[in-house]
Image (cartoon, rainbow, N blue to C red):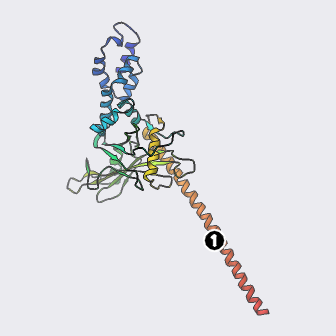
């Protein structure tokens, strides 16, 4: 409603109804500070004055980033985000849009420092459960994996242990997750999560362990290659506590990259794809959940077809070997029989 009102006052262009008659401090304090990112984007299109106010207001975008992703509200990340081309506004645009890899992405320079920061936020029914930032300094591991929590750490959710499959699924579906990967050297970022779960699985009846999976799929390599599609899989494990309350705790949160056969990629291969993703094009911010599920379903279908194709190839080779082996046995038997007949009649 505030946006519509501003648009109406600006149409006059002058006089008491013009937006230019309102002091910028009043607009920033009483209007812009109350708008979310989508409303700000719309408001910035109303006039050049509003666009200038919104685009240049770093504290405004800093507050939006921190309220949207509490994991970014630490001194080190604030410093990194402020170094982006347009500061926190650029960071928000990178992290809020859907990432992809453009076919024309330039070669990735792996000689530069490879440290990447993960800023992760988990919510249960829009209430924060976990917010944490970790630095990955080495990509020499094979297979590549980022673990957000130490093995002995756990984070309470404030939710009771589910007693059946339906409640376990409901628990998982109410957990939303954001995993922003930040390149402090290239000053780019991207969100690797589907926000809402792709799958929810109950794995233990005794502890009520629930395994929730999020992720994002890139078209990363040449058609027909093992990295034609790569899935950035994010796994969250929740388990019941040992005390009488039975409260569920988040015990594991991890990120790994998988190729078309479901094989984990190495650190070097993962770094190439992640850097290409940061440099690639960005899609519409709307429908991330639906787009994430669609990409995941396409990936699973392509993976199934690829595996079946390989099975058929191997089966064809085995059939050929069986036929060759059978022919060899038949020829050998024929030779033996012929020698027996020759010995009998000679």
Image quadrant in which you'd find residue 43: top left
Where is 322 relative to 79, above or below?
below
> 79 left or right of 96?
left
Q: Position of residue 80 (x, y in %)?
A: 33, 36
| Number of numbered tags placed on the structure image | 1
Q: Residue at x 59, y 63 (%)?
A: 314
Q: As displayed, is residue 323 above or below residue 22? A: below
Image quarter hosting the N terminus: top left
Kindly state the secondary structure of the residue where label 1 is placed: helix
Q: Nearer the viewer, residue 166 or 176?
A: 176
Image coords of residue 320 (percent x, y): 65, 67
* Image coordinates for residue 146, horizontal then vertical, percent: 36, 50
In the picture, residue 323 is in which quadrant? bottom right
The vertical placement of 297 against 80, above or below, is: below
75 in relation to 166, above or below: above
Q: Is residue 168 left or right of residue 261?
A: left
Query: Can I make out residue 264 in this image?
Result: yes
Residue bearing mark 1: 322
Question: Is residue 216 rendered to the left or right of residue 228?
Answer: left
Image quadrant in which the C terminus is located: bottom right
Q: Position of residue 302 (x, y in %)?
A: 53, 50
Residue 47 makes an appearance in the image:
no
Nearest the viewer among 303 and 116 is: 116
């Amino acid at each position: 409603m505030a946006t519509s009102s501003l648009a109406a006052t600006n149409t006059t262009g002058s006089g008491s109804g013009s937006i230019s008659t309102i002091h910028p401090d009043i607009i920033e304090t009483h209007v812009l500070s109350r708008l979310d990112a989508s409303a700000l984007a719309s408001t910035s299109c109303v006039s050049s004055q509003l666009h200038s106010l919104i685009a240049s207001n770093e504290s405004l975008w800093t507050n939006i980033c921190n309220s949207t992703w509490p994991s970014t509200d630490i001194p080190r990340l604030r410093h990194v985000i402020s170094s982006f081309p347009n500061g926190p506004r650029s960071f928000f645009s990178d992290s809020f849009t859907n990432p992809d890899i453009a076919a024309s992405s330039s070669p990735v320079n792996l000689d530069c420092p490879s440290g990447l920061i993960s800023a992760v936020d988990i919510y249960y029914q829009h209430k924060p459960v976990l917010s944490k930032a970790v630095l990955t300094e080495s990509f020499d591991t094979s297979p590549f994996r980022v673990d957000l929590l130490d093995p002995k750490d756990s984070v309470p959710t404030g939710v009771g242990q589910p007693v059946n499959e339906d409640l376990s699924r409901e628990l998982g579906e109410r957990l939303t997750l954001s995993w922003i990967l930040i390149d402090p050297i290239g000053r780019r970022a991207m969100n690797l999560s589907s926000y809402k779960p792709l799958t929810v699985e109950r794995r233990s009846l005794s502890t009520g362990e629930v395994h929730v999976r999020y992720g994002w799929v890139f078209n990363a390599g040449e058609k027909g290659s093992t990295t034609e599609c790569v899935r950035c899989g994010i796994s969250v494990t929740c388990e019941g506590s040992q005390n009488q309350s039975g409260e569920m705790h988040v015990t594991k949160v991890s990120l790994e990259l998988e190729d078309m056969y479901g094989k984990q990629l190495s650190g070097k291969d993962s770094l190439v794809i992640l850097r290409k993703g940061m440099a690639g094009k960005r899609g519409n911010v709307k429908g991330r959940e639906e787009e994430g599920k669609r990409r995941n379903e396409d990936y699973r279908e392509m993976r199934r077809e690829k595996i079946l194709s390989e099975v058929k190839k191997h089966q064809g080779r085995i059939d050929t070997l069986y036929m060759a082996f059978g022919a060899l046995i038949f020829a050998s038997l024929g030779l033996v029989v012929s020698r027996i007949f020759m010995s009998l009649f000679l």
